[in-house]
Each structure stands twice: as structure tokens, then as C-alpha cells.
Image: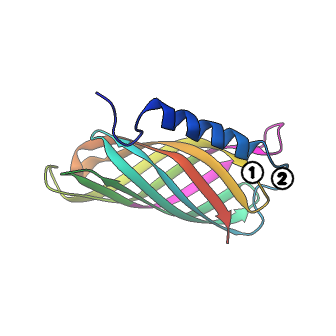
């Protein structure tokens, strides 16, 4: 069974080639140009399998530490799962100036369509990712998140496969 969001492997290969070309075309030195960073991610959620939209806004209080708010919206044919979460993200320096791995923690609320034990509950997340700084104002990357929503009695995995970040 093929996952409908990713389509066939040709589209996935094209996406990866375009991401590689975009990431190799610049030589930016800073992690971000301003204190506010907005992002939009698209990807997938698993358990259940849903299409994911992930807008986020962050404020960098220090060079490698940001806090902000993130929304994850999982859409399917009969199921809806969403979260609004306060997040903290730490970026780590490595030897390459354009690559920035990060770790993320969050606490917020989750809401879901019928089919879950409750339709509203607490949400906790932890995750990590990597981004490539294309220009001083633009970065592309991906993030893997483990999500816990105890009142909904669910664990789900979210993966914004493509996430674009930009300085505001």
C-alpha cells in the first residue's frame, strides 16, 4: 500500500534533488538574521496516518535558544488531530557553519475529532531536527517529533518533512 501524501518515488526523488540544490547554493554565516523566526512545515503524522501542516513562530532570546508557539494540524479523510504548543528549541553549533541540528521540547493542548477517548487534552512533545541555512534570512530543514497526549490516550509521531524558516 502506497502512502498517498508522498505519492510515487519519482516525486520524492525530485523533492530531495531540489532540496540538495537549494542547500548547496549559499554560504550563510549566521543562524538567523533577526530575533523573530517564522516557519511552515508540511509532512506526515503517524498513528493515525495524516497529512501534517505545521506553522510555528519563535523568538530567539539568545543566539542558540528560542521559545515560541507551534501548531500541528493533522488532516485525514475521517480524522482530525491538532495541537497548539509552547515550545523551546536549542540549536547546536557544529563545524559546518550552515548546518544547525536542534532539540525541541513543548507543552500545550491537543484536540481531536471523534474516535479518541477525549476530544481535548494535554499535549507534550520532544523532538529534534536539522536545518540548512540557505541565506541569512532563510533556512530549510526537517524535524522529527514524538508527541504524547495522555487524556486522548494516544502517542503519535509527527514529521514535517520539509520545513522552511524565515526571519521576520
Q: Tell me if residue 87 comes above or below residue 10 in the rendering.
A: below
Picture disc at residue 149:
none
The magenta segment = 84-102
Q: In which quadrant will I find the C terminus?
A: bottom right
Instruction: Give the labeled residue for mark 2.
Output: 28
Asked if the stretch drawn in magenta spans residue 100, the answer is: yes
Q: Secondary structure at mark 2?
A: loop
Picture coordinates of residue 82, whole percent (x, y) = 33, 58
Q: Are marks 2 and 1 in contact (CB under 8 Å)?
A: yes
Give the percent coordinates (x, y) of residue 67. Answer: 59, 62
Q: Marks 2/1: CA distance?
A: 6 Å
Residue matched to label 1: 133
Which residue is situated farthest in the front direction here?
10
Q: Which residue lies at the image location 75% right of the left edge and 52% below the top edge?
A: 134
What residue is shown at x 29% (from left), y 38% (from top)?
47
Corner quadrant of residue 35: bottom right
* Label 1 Cα neighbours within 10 Å, binned few <14 / some 14-19 / many ≥20: many
Indicate the secondary structure of the residue bearing disc 1. Answer: strand
Where is residue 124? Give x, y as percent: 40, 50
For label 2, count other residues whose C-alpha is less than 10 Å away and answer few (under 14), some (14-19) or many (20+): some
Amino acid at each position: 500500500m502506497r502512502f498517498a501524501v508522498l505519492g510515487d518515488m519519482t516525486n520524492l526523488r525530485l523533492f530531495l534533488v531540489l532540496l540538495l540544490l537549494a542547500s548547496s547554493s549559499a554560504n550563510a554565516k549566521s543562524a538567523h538574521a533577526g530575533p523573530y523566526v517564522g516557519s511552515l512545515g508540511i509532512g506526515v503524522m503517524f498513528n493515525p496516518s495524516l497529512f501534517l501542516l505545521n506553522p510555528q513562530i519563535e523568538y530567539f532570546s539568545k543566539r542558540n535558544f528560542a521559545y515560541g508557539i507551534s501548531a500541528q494540524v493533522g488532516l485525514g479523510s475521517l480524522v482530525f488531530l491538532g495541537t497548539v504548543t509552547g515550545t523551546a528549541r536549542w540549536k547546536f553549533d557544529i563545524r559546518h557553519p550552515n548546518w544547525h541540528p536542534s532539540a525541541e521540547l513543548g507543552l500545550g493542548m491537543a484536540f481531536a475529532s471523534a474516535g479518541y477517548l477525549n476530544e481535548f487534552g494535554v499535549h507534550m512533545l520532544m523532538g529534534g531536527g536539522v536545518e540548512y541555512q540557505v541565506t541569512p534570512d532563510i533556512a530549510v530543514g526537517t524535524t522529527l517529533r514524538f508527541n504524547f497526549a495522555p487524556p486522548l490516550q494516544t502517542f503519535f509521531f509527527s514529521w514535517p518533512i520539509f520545513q522552511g524558516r524565515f526571519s521576520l
